[in-house]
Image (cartoon, rainbow, N blue to C red):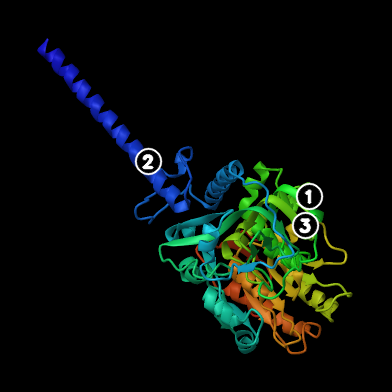
Amino acid sequence: MPGFLSTIKALLVACFIVTLCSVNRRWRATKQRIMISQSLGSGVETTNRSDYFTVVDIKTSERLSTEFNRDILVEAYNTMISRLRLEVLRSLEQESWPDLSVERQKLLLTTKGVLERLKEHSGFHLQLLEIPRSWLSSVLRNRYYDYSSNNCTTIETNSKGSGKFLEMWFNATCYSDMHQTIAHQMLRERAPRFLRISMPPKSNVDDAKAILTFMTLIEHAVLDANGDIITRDLDVVPIRCRESWVYDNLTRVDINTIEIYDEVFSAHQFFGKQFYHATLETLIRLVPYLSFLRQNPQIKIHLGYHHPFLPLLGISNRRIVVAPRVRGKLVYMPAGGGCGNQPVFPIQLLSETLRRSTNSRNRDTMLLIQRSAAKTRKFKYHDEIVAALRNEARLVGLRMAVFSDDPLPSLTETVDLFSRAVIVISPHGAGAANLLFAHPGTVLIEALHPSSSHYPNLCFASMAQALGLRYHGLFKESGVTETTVTELLTPVLNYIRRTISSGIDEHHVHCFINHVHGDIPSKITIQFAEHQCI
């Protein structure tokens, strides 16, 4: 009997220890989720998402689970927005519309301390997507590149979207020798600066955490022709083109003539009817919230026009409101889209989302963008350029294709052309916005065009930096039209030769080429960074 009692006692002690360990594990897991919830924002419960928190070192944030990625983070953020929406709808105040004849205070999101004002203002409900900086490598692309030009002096000192901007915010340097732009730089060398692009002042100066984007829910507001939000006492101006001096004059508008909806998502901005701006400055406002919008199909979306990419984002044209002004009992105002300088997280998210629409893994195309004869900034010697590029493409085993805007290819063809591109040659124009479909590391050779102020516009250089593309800017005072075959072939051949003769990174894919140009021997291994080619 004493032996039996000793056995029972030992079993009870063992059960107690096992139970205690189990409770301790559950407590630690709960504590981890609470800390993650605090990192992601207030009001989040993550008890159903324990699968990707199990191996995260929360206290130091030095490492993340291999299962944690951008998609999981975005889904958690959308859950936060959904819960905030329900809270606001339950407490929505009685209708109180602004008097449009009265001038209100303008609140620009470029104002210092604006996030604090949004958070504290009555009828406004702010939600940040804020994470530890140590998580950025699981959320953003990790490889970026310096850029090149035949005229770095002009680009760095006298351009719209100046090279000084590229240096200041992307830590990117312009080189006349393209070879110096082949190797990549890591995220840690870029993120401290570029996280501030098109974000409110002082919003990303904390060394420990980073705001990727934010959303404000606003009660009873008017959305105007520029994407500004008008409430009883404020005109809220998101970060957009010409936010400091172009406004919609509503003083003579009868508010009762403006269509009203229960819930409206504000995506439209100034220039929002033009393809470039609508793509890179309005769609990036939508893309962080696709899951939320799909779960709430009754929410209308204010846009400048029915964008051709909407089907790829899972957004039905039936919910799009194309009107100068609309009213919403509850308005969703996401972070602004910037003007030619997009915030990095949303534009990368847009690119990754759009690229899921193609199953092609081949990268085998040299792509030339053609602007139609009815437009400016077109290559005068287009036919000669096509012939020369086709010959060079053949010699290195690539196919040569032309993306023309007259007639415009189908969406399927557009996706296929740009997703298969190794190198894209383009006159300055909106067609280059389709590089959202391109793989990281793809080269854009852009013929820059001087404006009326005689400086080139570097909006696509900025886009290339944000997306981790390689970029060469070809600039001449006479403009795009007079660009010669030789001037374009020089950077094309330089890129091909440099890429063939040097390894890119540890993720390269070998593509054997039977013929190459010039003095490079045959059957050389050509290494395109990170992605399959031929």
Secondary structure beneath disc 3?
helix
Residue carrying label 1: 317
Look at the image and tell me whether residue 501 can be seen: yes
Closest to the camera, between mark 3 and mark 1, is: 3
Does 275 sit left or right of 212 as displayed?
Answer: right
Residue sitting at the far top: 1
Does 449 sit left or right of 407 as displayed?
Answer: left
64 in relation to 510, above or below: above
Position of the N terminus by quadrant: top left
83 in relation to 278, above or below: above
Residue carrying label 2: 29
Q: Amino acid at mark 3?
A: Ile
**How far apart are the two marked residues, 2 and 3, measured between alpha carbons?**
52 Å
**How far apart are the two marked residues, 2 and 1, measured between alpha carbons?**
43 Å
Mark before the other along the chain sequence, 3 or 1: 3
Give me the residue at 54% from left, 49% from top.
77
